Amino acid sequence: MTEERKRNLKRSWLKFGSNPLSVLGLVSVLLVVFLAVFSPWVAPHPESWAKWVDFKNALLAPSWDHPFGTDVFGRDILSRVFFGFRYDLLMAVSILVLVVPLGTVIGLIAGYYRGSLLDTVIMRITDIFLAIPSIVLALAICAMLEPTLFNSMMAVSVLWWPWYTRLAYGIASSLKNEYFVQAAELTGASTPHILFREILPNCISPIFTKMTLDVGWVILIGSTLSFVGLGAQEPIPALGTMVAAGTKYMPDYWWMTIFPAIAIAFTILGFNLLGDGLRDLLAVEEI
Amino acid sequence: MYIGRRLVLSVFVLLGLSIFIFTLSRVIPGDPARLSLGPMAPQWAVDQLRERLHLNEPLPVQYVIWLTNAIHGDFGESIVTKRPVILDVITFFPASLELVLLSTIVSTVLAIVIGAISGRRANSWFDNAFRLFSYIGIAVPTFVWAIMALFLFGYVWKILPTMGQLSTNIAPPPTITGMMGLDALLTGNITAFLDHFRYMLMPAFAMSIGRIAQEARILRSGFIENLKKDYITAEVSYGIPERSITFKYLMKPSLIPMISILGMDIAASMGGSFIIETIFNWPGFGRYGMWAMLNKDLNAIIAVVVIIGAFFAISNIVVDLIIASVDPRIRMMERGA
Amino acid sequence: MSEELLKIEGLSINYKVYEDFFKVVHNASFRVGQGEKIGLIGESGCGKTTTMRAIMRALADNALITQGQILFQGKDIIKMSPDEIQKIRRKSISMIFQDPTAALNPVFKIGEQLTDIIRYSSQAAGKHLTKEEMKEQAVEALKNVALPDPERILQNYPIQLSGGMRQRVCIAAALISSGDLLIADEPGTSLDVTIEDQILRLLAGLVEKRRTSIILISHALGAVKGMVDRVYVMYAGSMVEVAKTDDLFSEPLHPYTVDLFKTVPKITGGGVPEPIPGHIPDYLNPPMGCRYYPRCKHAMPICDKEVPTFRHQGKDHEVACFLFEDVN
């Protein structure tokens, strides 16, 4: 690694670290990811994630043995929260892995061919999916399908890709008249080359930052869907489902609702802080 | 003209949206007629209903029939309420509008005040406290705020009512606009108004928190951005006082980005009402929409989606008009275009 | 040259960016007499604008004045109270910015901005004007800068005016709030050359008529030559030479000034212009001694160790260079 590279990396780290909130975000995200990945080994009561009953220990208040208490079936809520991270994170990653490449490619094409019929068609279709608040469209799609984790993931994917299309579109259409693109065209570069080797690298920073922020937003919408019962069903410990299940027992057995709710907020907050820190660091203006 | 173009575009987008949601409703497994009549109804009744609802026609024909009816306000019948959907919409929409209005007024005022102070005094203790709050406000899902509020104000401290619109011992005011608070004021019924207001507080609060955080943040960053601009330095060098710079010369250009997300935020509030009204049992459009979704009430679902889409489009156009009136650069660009 | 209007002595300004300090202005000294016209030349990034902003106390939040004085009519601007500095901004000193498009608030009409300036500057003079009087003064101000149809322009937004017109409006605004000193930061650089010429002539005429002092910043040497009495040359944060205009251009002394003039192509011919090798110093870690040392053809060992002060070399001609000894 060259000296200058090292200096830049150090500068970047200092810049990132100068904002305590960004660091807090990074730490939170790492914690959540760690718990998600290692939950079967780290959770104090790993059997709690599935169809486990232990009525002797049902509805216990928070204690040393069960820091978040137990639910109506006697399952340890702390462990279920760890597994909840797993499912929520899995959902977010799966959706983004599908949506980001697809949306970006479509946006690049539309932006590069800006002004053509192809552009108009693509962008109008994009507009359709952005025409109502995401939550309503997600609810409507999920309502028509059977309520499962997979279906809710499909629904959210369907309405998420337009955001990346718009982002890529904006960058591609503003860059297509830049000299370096015209130079590539004039030397006979193929369109895929121009799209992926010339224009795409300029999109990496905004896309990466947006992806980080989006993990939080997808978890938000996913937990809302599972809260109303249209997402993952029992016994899958989606955090939203846990909150919903607990509302019946409010306020006496408040821990069933409050702890999963805080876990959701904590996760989203972490990704938001990290995403904002990245945005500042990479000096992204497009989002 | 500008509005004309936007309206036409919005109509196209709404049409596309309606095609999407209609197609989805017809391609999913399950028979809408069977759903409507229930599992006990005899097959011949189901077949008859299928004929009446044109369910055996090809999809494009069905859509055209739906569209023709919809333009005349006929969205079919609701499975849940067994009434024309349009009647349900008219009944329930004002109650949601009332919440959204209250939430908008409160959010906008607070966002302007907080955002301006934070932006002007960046990195002060106020600003840092606000930034912390804003992160939490944006990151926490609306339903979590709603549950927390319900828990604290409704159950623990017991100072606010947990569901409905009015205490059972108070007579509701006559329906003029459909917005109970407004109706109470219009008929001079202060008791009902105050009581009703208590019921509005928590749902409106849950709706507003995220908005205040986001809108104040945008105003704040507008302030910070514009503070660096030469014209502010110029105004300082001409000796224009601090107060005038903050509330006039910085405020106006900085408000523009905030106003532009106002349209989206109002629509988002409508979307959030689905959850909030269900939690607080508020008889509004959102609760109706939620029932429709949970009960696979296809006619209602389609109507809800299209109506919210229309609401979104209208609020965006109105907001764009407001911005055009505030920012001359937009007007010039439009003329040149 | 009568009593001194403005005297800057040993001014140093740092910019703080994260943990780093950029020592941009370094021991700068500057004098403007009553009614004098001063030119300030130097490359982009040498600290001209920063110094001028310091005079108006309009520096960015991360700029720190670490030493020095700015004496205006005998009183130190750096130490003045907010009220005193406000009064100065409204009545005595004013600045014309480089980019007129950026210097006008885009969402307010010209009339509104000018009226506010008139309101506050007349308040500082103890007068209270009615709305009609303020409007009349605004129209007058626009007429003074040779803008046609002033009433209509008052109703316009900046975006509706051409670049040249915007610059005139900025000049009008500056004239309202300046009685003693006008600072013109590269007026017209962002405009067409012919418009720039008009603007400079306009400024010259106005300054002549009102007998205000002016500091004209430019990196167009020709423009400066025709207009001012004395010229300061600035390099990397400090003044390196000052002389009467004709003296400076006919007999430049400081190696930087000499090299600078060589970079300008001459219409009279005489060879190819030579660029100056090297680059301006890194403000993060500037040289300990003379900041021109790394690029100077006549560098001596002492230049690396000590900072040269101004030495007198004839009437009103001073040079900050170890090559010269104080002649007085």
Image: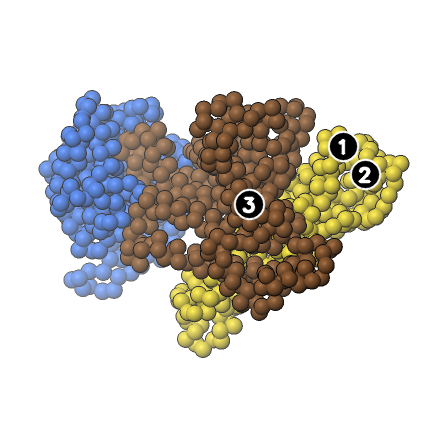
- Name the residue: 49% across, 36% down: B178
Give the side of residue C167 with respect to residue B173, left or right. Answer: left
Q: Colour of chain A?
A: yellow
Of the pair C254 and A45, the residue shown nearer to us: A45
Of the pair B101 and B188, the residue shown nearer to us: B188
Residues indicated by labels 2 and 3 sit on the same polypeptide chain? no
Rendered location of residue A185, percent (x, y): 43, 74
Q: Colour of chain B?
A: brown
Q: Quadrant of the C terminus of chain C?
A: top left
Name the element at disc 1.
Answer: loop
Please tell me in which quadrant of the rendered image residue B281 appears: top right
Q: Amino acid at mark 3?
A: Asp
Location of mark 2 (residue): A72
Mark sitting earlier along the chain (2/1):
2
Location of mark 1 (residue): A253
Location of mark 3 (residue): B88
Rendered location of residue C259, percent (x, y): 28, 54
- Name the residue: 28% across, 40% down: C108
Give the side of residue B98 with respect to residue B145, left or right. Answer: left
Q: Is residue A36 above or below residue A110?
A: above
Q: Is residue B210 visible?
A: no
Q: Amino acid at mark 2?
A: Val
Q: Colour of chain C?
A: blue
Name the element at disc 3.
Answer: helix
- Name the residue: 65% across, 28% down: B154
